[in-house]
Amino acid sequence: MSAHNVIELDNVTKDYRSGHNVVHALRGIDLSIGGGEMIAIMGASGSGKSTLMNILGCLDVPTSGAYRLDDVHVNELSKNELADLRNRKLGFVFQGFNLLPRTSALENVELPLLYDRSGRKRDTRAMAAAALTRVGLGDRLDHHPSELSGGQQQRVAIARALVSEPTLVLADEPTGNLDSHTSVEIMALFQELNDQGITILIVTHETDIAQYAKRIVEVRDGRIIRDERLADRRRASEDLRNIPDPDAADAPREPNAAAPPDAPREPVRGGRA
């Protein structure tokens, strides 16, 4: 883990006003996340974890307190500067995959690069192909989402998050739409990427999924009530051996799985995508 802090929150609050009423969504959050960490943020509905995720993802700004992302003071940025920071520093993975249905896997992954205004990322197709190969989908470049299983679609979403070489990957309930076996497969991929030094933050309500992180941060009533490192972290690649694969030939298919089962995944490549 790097000594450099990717995220620093200092006494962050977030209030929402509705008429004369004020909702205190966050109440003085202090949080530091070092480079190379893999953190699970947990909390019940209404705990403030979604608000915290929005602030960390530069989708919202604190009411008070300070947020620094990779030494950039987020509070001081305009909306356009926030959008540029998101594109340069952050990769997002969502529960619902958020893929364009009429667009190939390659084009879905390439999309964030088309918004890059630095002019540095010129061979966007090659970068997208490399990111897909990195998550084991080098043979699915031309497939559309409807031709992919749920696990493959989430891998495309992870490749899209990685393609811009972000400082931090934010995953919001990334296993929420997946069966148990595929969920652990996705967590195995996250662990492999984290082992390569990528900083990953996962928002989840699933205790078993959180056990694959290196550290758990629990939020309740807008405050952090638990922040602990896992001494006995589970390895998803080992757990996969004991979880039946519903896409196996002798097992029932997922209700929405119209595509062939996942092909064996190529090993995650080292280096930057």
Image (cartoon, grey):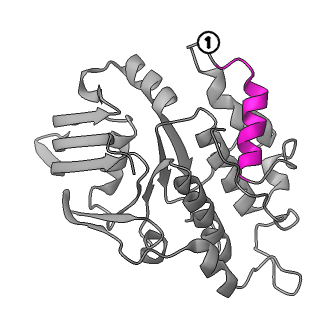
Q: Is residue 122 magenta?
A: yes
Q: Residues within 10 Å of mark 1 (few under 14, many from 20)?
A: few
Q: Quadrant of the C terminus?
A: top right
The vertical placement of 233 against 152, above or below, is below
Q: Relative to residue 186, is residue 172 depicted above or below?
A: above
Name of the residue lying farthest toward the left: 20
Q: Position of residue 205 (x, y in %)?
A: 41, 69
Q: Name the foreground residue: 188 vs 272.
A: 272
- Residue at position x 63%, y 38% in the image: 272
The rendered magenta stretch, by its main secondary structure, is classed as helix
Q: Nearer the viewer, residue 108 or 136?
A: 136
Q: Which is nearer the eye, 263 or 51?
A: 263
Which range of residues does the magenta coloring cover? 121-135
The residue located at (36%, 72%) in the rendering is 230
Say if the magenta span includes residue 111: no
Q: Could you say where residue 201 lies in the image, as x and y percent from the top left?
A: 43, 53
Residue 221 visible, this orientation? no
- Residue ID at (73%, 25%): 124
Q: How many marks?
A: 1
> Relative to 17, is 163 on the left or the right?
right
What's the amino acid at mark 1?
Gly
Q: Which residue is mark 1?
A: 119
Q: Residue at x 79, y 58 (%)?
A: 266
Query: Which of 210 and 63 lies nearest the eye of the viewer?
Result: 210
Is residue 198 at all visible to an observer of this figure?
A: yes
Q: Is residue 208 left or right of residue 251?
A: left
Q: Quadrant of residue 62?
A: top left
Circle 1 SS class: loop
Q: Is residue 107 left or right of residue 8?
A: right
Q: Report x, y in % for residue 55.
A: 32, 40
Q: Is residue 221 left or right of residue 188?
A: left
**Quarter of the image where one finds residue 67:** top left
